[in-house]
Image: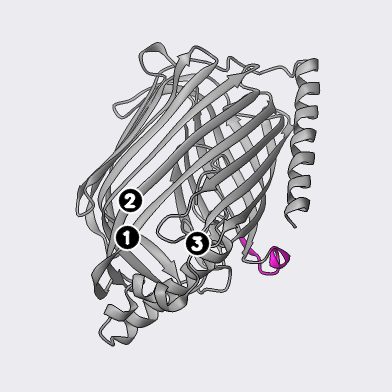
Amino acid sequence: MKKIIWKRVIVTVFCCWFYSTAAFAITFDRRQDQFDKTPGLFVLPVPYSFPGIGKGLFLIGNAGNIAETSTDVFGMGFTGDAQGFFVSVDEFFVIPDWTYLALTQGKIARFGQNVYSSRGMKSEKNDFNIYVGKDFTFYNYELVFTHFERRLELAYGFNGGKGKFVEIRDFEGELVQKLASPVEVDFAQKHLQLKIDLTDDYGDPRDGLNIRILRDSFPSVNQGAAFNSLTFALTYYLPIPENNTWAFHYFRSDAHVREEGNTDLESLKTTQGYYACGGFAACEAATLKSSQNQLNANKNGSSKSLGGADRLRSYPGNRYQAAHTLFYGTELRWNFNTENTKLDYWLLQDVQQALQAVFFWEQGSVAEEIGEIGETIRSSYGSGIRLVTKSGSVYKFEMATGDEGAEIILFFEYPWMGLFGS
């Protein structure tokens, strides 16, 4: 099996290299400057209320191309029950137009994670518990080499985080049990990513092909599995006059275990707090499910998840996860206004590049065994509106629906662009 997988990787990389070399040779024209330094600013205060976490206010701020450079800064500050911050600096060039850094740092006083009854596709909408934690810190650092007007990029980075779960709550946020011994959260990984962008524009593509290959390496932490995951994403943009595009996306992610972690269920039940439940049935049921999920993760590893603003948008983030992931979708982007218009408002300052209506449909599947991928499939479809700016931000408001109801998506970039979600 491993030989077959690596043969596929070698063939894929060779095909990408061959195609990209040919494309560079014929000079695939860019539609505009790929290092535009138009400044942008966006600030928005938003109240929040999360089941099991609490209420408060967070302030979102985004500054694009600050100080006449290509550097972007995004930040989010939390007040109330989930105090903390999140700061991301992107495209901090150490060699102009050639090499840049991307840095992320964050800390949250109170956080939550949905733990479903099982990995894979068989859990129901409300069949989960909320594990509530405190003092979560995380980081991501990346070095990126970019060449040929951003047609070819190679990135190397590492990220990780630490925290601890202290409570178990039901799906409505009601307390099930306080954990006598906190469950530690500790992860770390390294990644290497190749991007081949054969489109007419890096930030707002309307014609061409985008290929990305990502290899993550996870060490064994807290008796977990040591494994690699290989992710491949391909997006084709079919131009539709005038200035519109029809996008087609294919995504595949697979975990390959180097060394299994702890697969003894009784031992995992101890670390997950089962024997500290004091005989309380709801607590025992929640910790048993969590232990079984951890056993599968320690045995099979984890590929990229489905759900959230990037893939399978009608489901919450990290809704579906297992060892293998398959996803594909299509999206019609209609740019009904492409006039460059200066935006000068109190909370928004930028230059409008396009106003865009979007209609999309997506399908995805996850499975523990590679032969079972695609047996159970979930779908999302919906529409929305986007503001595309010259500073590089894409402000979007979308509504997606699927088998478990509807989700509203507010985000700052195009979908299908992120590969780093666990």
Badge 1 crowding class, 10 Å Cα cut-off, few under 14, some 14 to 19, many 20 or more, is some
Please tell me which of labels 3 and 1 falls first in the chain.
Answer: 1
Q: Which residue is mark 1?
A: 184
Question: How much space separates mark 1 and mark 2, taking CA atoms?
Answer: 8 Å
Mark 2 vs mark 3: which is more N-terminal?
Answer: 2
Residue 319: image tag: 3
Which quadrant of the structure image shows residue 283? bottom left
- Residue 418, image quadrant: top right
Residue 375 falls within the magenta-colored stretch? yes
Up-down relation of residue 181 to residue 380 (above or below): below
SS at badge 2: strand
Query: What's drawn in magenta, residue-wise?
Result: 370-379
Query: Along the line of sight, which residue is nearer the eye, 308 or 188?
Result: 188
Residue 157 in view here: yes
Marks 2 and 3 sit apart, C-alpha to C-alpha, by 21 Å
Drawn side of residue 238 relative to residue 82, left or right:
right
Query: Between tags 2 and 3, which lies in front?
Result: 2
Question: Which residue is pictured at 76% across the width and 40% down the height?
Answer: 10
